[in-house]
Image: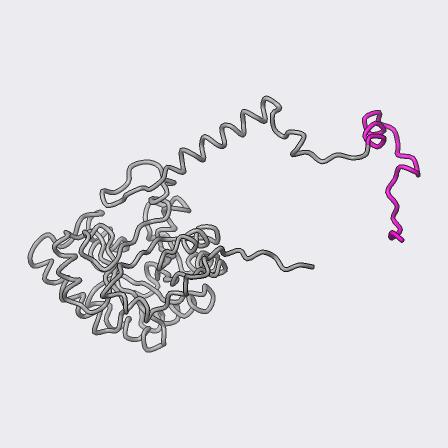
Amino acid sequence: MSEAAPTNPVPADLRPITVPIVRERKSGPKLTMVTAYDHPSASIASAAGIDMILVGDSVANAVHGFEKTLSATVDLMVIHAAAVTRAKPHSLVVVDMPWLSYHVTVEDAVRNAGRLVAEGGAEAVKLEGGSNRVEVIEAIVAAEIPVMGHLGLTPQSVNAMGGYKVQGKAIEDAQQMIADAKALEEAGVFSIVLEGVPDVLGEAITEAVDVPTIGIGAGDGTDGQVLVFHDVLGLGGGRYPKFVRSYADLRADAVDALQRYAADVQSGAFPSEAETYHVRDEVARMLADGGALSDSSQPSSSPSA
């Protein structure tokens, strides 16, 4: 039996992206990151040469239809992370630690991060928060698990923030965020996501730390950018945030394709002769007449000579 074709069409010239490689990219070229929640999307992202895949807790919204990321659990993240890593992408796979997986005790945080690595195949984890997360980050890093930080608009804090609002507009808040970024760097993060902050603050934080920054709604002065897979491909529908640019309209293409399929089924155009299996003419006639197959027309059960 011949070996199955590879499920991951990664170009041969793409080497696996690792945490040290991401660190080295502080000086460029800029880093690219998209979310992925399953085997097909991870394979597509890898084939496109995307540097990092984020198995985000946004899976709660994008895939499961919840209103907030707060509905994601460690069990859910493990399932989606494992689906992504089975695609064997060249991209570095970072998995979000969901709400309450690192908020209770340091021991819980390390244990949950370990599950994402051991069961989900994560190569790094991401968690939200500033100086208040230093102890947790230090413990996870001490367990040899790379950590990506996340500052600014942190969706797990949406209730405390009073909604999805741009953060760091006031000078005091901006200064605190810069201090938080430095604290995260000191705690050992290898990169920091900056979400929903003014462009000047995104640039100021990027200059203040020696680890790469990944922006999402943080202007073009960061060391890289991240977007949701479904948003980039136009799969989500509805209104997208201001910082999103869709590079395709696959939702419309998918609706059109399914409508054409349904129309072909109704008209009889599908399946065609080319898409249909056939038997010998004499067998077809007997089946059409409702008659039993004769012994001579039945396939032999004995092995061929």
Q: Is residue 292 magenta?
A: yes
The x, y position of residue 303, in whole percent, is: 87, 53
Q: Outermost residue toward the left?
A: 171
Residue at 45%, 32% in the rendered image? 255
Q: Magenta region's main secondary structure?
A: loop
What is the quadrant of residue 274 in the picture?
top right
Residue at 61%, 28% in the rendered image? 270
Q: Outermost residue toward the top?
A: 267
Viewed as shown, does residue 260 lie left or right of 205?
Answer: right
Q: Could you say which is closer to the camera, residue 69 or residue 169? A: 169
The x, y position of residue 227, in whole percent, is: 31, 50
The x, y position of residue 39, in whole percent, is: 48, 54
Q: Could you say which is closer to the camera, residue 89 or residue 10? A: 10
Residue at 93%, 38% in the rendered image? 295
Q: Is residue 181 above or below residue 194?
A: below
Q: Which residues are magenta?
A: 281-305
What is the quadrant of residue 81 in the picture?
bottom left
Q: Report the number of discs.
A: 0
Task: Please state, as top left, top right, bottom left or bottom right, where the N terminus lies in the image.
Answer: bottom right
Q: Colour scheme used in the picture?
A: one colour
The x, y position of residue 194, in whole percent, is: 22, 57
Q: Could you say which is closer to the camera, residue 7 or residue 289? A: 7
Q: Outermost residue toward the front?
A: 13
What is the quadrant of residue 157 in the picture?
bottom left
Q: Outermost residue toward the bottom?
A: 142
Q: Is residue 45 magenta?
A: no
